[in-house]
Amino acid sequence: MLTSKSRLTILTLVLFIFALALPLNALAHGGHGHQKPAKKAILLVTFGTSVPEAQKVFTSVDQAFKKAFPGVEVRWAYTAKIVRDMVAKKQGKTWLSPSEALAKLMSEGYTHVAVQSLHVIPGAEFHDLVAVVHGFARMSHGFKVLISYPLCSTVRDLKAVVGIVAKNLPKGAAKDDAVVFMGHGTHHPAGVVYAAIAYMLQQEGDRLLMGTVEGYPSLDDVVAQLKAKKVKKAYLLPFMTVAGDHAMNDMAGPEPDSWKSILEKNGIKAVPVMRPITALPAVVDIFIKHAKHCFEHLK
Ligand code: CO
């Protein structure tokens, strides 16, 4: 026979074990009305670059994100298959595509994933990424995933970025010198953002100009402005997240159709500066702000 005291002890023990088992059960299964503990990740998505020197800026972006989001897994994906293949072949490094990276995070049990587009404008690559992320968002209730805006998405963003680059003009640039930023440009409707950036740069300084490789404003537009302003010397900087192939060849290359060559043909001394906008920590902070905002909506 058990005494009432020992019966009470057994009952207490049973209740205690039951109480312990509940959260364990919730942790293990995650379903049945119980919440899985949050396992957060950020997926940073870029076009990518095959230029090892240019990849270095991604390392500092990675470190800034890890510092801003302690305890959150930070991963990367390259959208460009051609770049992924080239890097794998030449450097033996494997970069995942956005869908590969998301599938991996899903299978590893991540519950909250903020996909941060490292694109400059919300153009074609950003919209391709939106489609991928929406697909994953529909797959599972236990996998919350949201895409965040790229760098120049709102008037506020544009003004902030333009303000930052205007405060960080290349060393040695005199008052009479022009500073020309080279954006990528696109056929996508979002390409109009470059015209807005050009307008805002002009408000910051008469000799701050914007041109694009593949869109509007063009290099011809830039040359016409430089001539009208009687500029003798212009600094050239990429308005891109990496100073990769476009900066090295289209902007600063020795070929007769590079920006440097065309400016010099027009009697303007051209000084290329291989500094991407992500080399400015304040620019990286804008991406971080977007990712923080994204997590707020993921709750
Ligand atoms: Co390109």
Image (cartoon, rainbow, N blue to C red):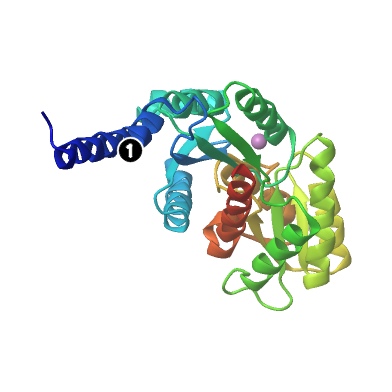
The quadrant of the picture occupied by the N terminus is top left
Label 1: few (<14), some or many (≥20) within 10 Å? few
Can you see residue 259? yes
Q: Is residue 5 left or right of residue 121?
A: left
Q: Residue at x 82, y 67 (%)?
A: 202
Residue 117 sits in quarter: top right
Q: Please give the residue where the numbered disc 1 appears in the rendered image.
A: 19
Question: Toward the viewer: 43 or 106?
Answer: 106
Residue 164 sits in quarter: bottom right
Ligand 1 within 8 Å of disc 1? The answer is no
Q: Is residue 21 left or right of residue 34?
A: left
* Number of numbered labels in the structure image: 1
Asked if 106 appears above or below 69 in the picture, the reply is above
Q: Residue at x 70, y 56 (%)?
A: 181
Quarter of the displayed picture in which ligand 1 can be seen: top right
**Residue 228: x, y in percent?**
89, 65
**Residue 50: x, y in percent?**
48, 35
Considering every residue shown, the one lying at the far bottom of the view is 175
